[in-house]
Amino acid sequence: MSLVDLRRDGDVFVLTMRAGENRFNRESVDALNATLDTVEASNGAAALVTTGEERFYSNGLDLNWMMGDGAGEGATFVGDVQRMLGRFLVLPVPTVAAINGHAFAAGGMLALAHDFRVMRSDRGFFCLPEVDIHVPLAPGMTALIACRLSPTVFRDVILTGARIGGPDAVARGIVDEAVAADEVLPAAIARAAALASKDRQTYGALKRSMYAAPYEILQRGALP
């Protein structure tokens, strides 16, 4: 089974991560980049929705892989993850994260890299737990989080490591809406479809201008 599935729902590309907790390792990052290549190479109206399966949107970096088979990649891999997040941030089509379950650490950052976010209201948490797992954030990751959240929420999510459910995430401005589990993907697709006809050149230029500073830091891919 492939790590990601990419299908079309009208003008909307739907990317489903299908690797359990959907942690990021070399294989999964390469697969996500390949899907972005496909979306960028398409013509006509388009938007992108990403989601996971069952309990997980994404639980972030695959630390077991990074300490095992991926140990030799070190800074290269962390840099590549940041560059992947940067691609999502400035992708020249509308993007919506359909957060079907837990979005932890870099998985939460992936959701933040989208233009809009729809989260499950009854179960699942958004969480940046680095303060509790003793993992400093890379500069690009900090810049991404800061460009998406208010200063107070930015402070709180990083320094407390709090687990934040859907309704609270809406109240804090982390996500745009929280809906029942079976409505997450349809709501995200509807939101994306409403924007899919936007001119790509203009849309991409606006995003590159809006997020020029965090994108540049993500592209550098520096370690903490």
Image (spheres, rainbow, N blue to C red):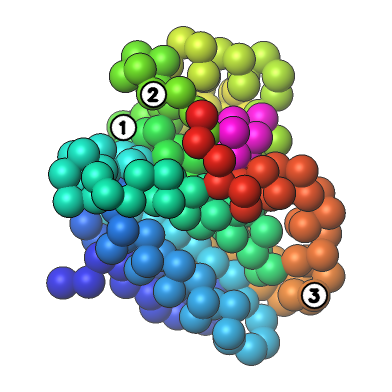
* Residue type pointed to by label 1: Arg
Spot the residue most to the top: 160
- The 10 Å Cα crowd at callout 1, few under 14, some 14 to 19, many 20 or more, is some
Query: Looking at the image, is mark 1 or mark 2 earlier in the sequence?
Result: 1
The Cα atoms of the two marked residues, 1 and 3, are separated by 38 Å
Q: Which residues are magenta?
A: 139-146
Q: Nearer the viewer, residue 144 or 123?
A: 144
The Cα atoms of the two marked residues, 3 and 2, are separated by 37 Å
Count the marks. Answer: 3
Horizontal arrangement in the rendering, residue 175 relative to residue 74 (left or right): right
Q: Nearer the viewer, residue 221 or 82?
A: 221
As displayed, is residue 19 above or below residue 169?
Answer: below
How far from the left and from the top, in percent, is residue 151? 71, 19
Q: Say which quarter of the image contains residue 203.
A: bottom right
Q: Which mark is residue 135?
A: 2
As displayed, is residue 57 above or below residue 90?
Answer: above
Query: Looking at the image, is mark 3 or mark 2 earlier in the sequence?
Result: 2
How far from the left and from the top, in percent, is residue 33? 45, 67
As displayed, is residue 62 above or below residue 208?
Answer: above
How far from the left and from the top, in percent, is residue 152? 67, 14
Task: Report whether residue 180 is seen.
Answer: no
Residue located beneath label 3 in the image: 201
- The 10 Å Cα crowd at callout 3, few under 14, some 14 to 19, many 20 or more, is few
Identified at 16% across, 44% down, the residue is 68
* Residue type pointed to by label 3: Gln
The reply to whether discs 1 and 2 touch (Cβ–Cβ < 8 Å) is no
Residue located beneath label 1 in the image: 123
The reply to whether discs 3 and 2 touch (Cβ–Cβ < 8 Å) is no
The Cα atoms of the two marked residues, 1 and 2, are separated by 26 Å
Query: Looking at the image, is mark 1 or mark 3 earlier in the sequence?
Result: 1
Residue 82 part of the magenta-drawn span: no
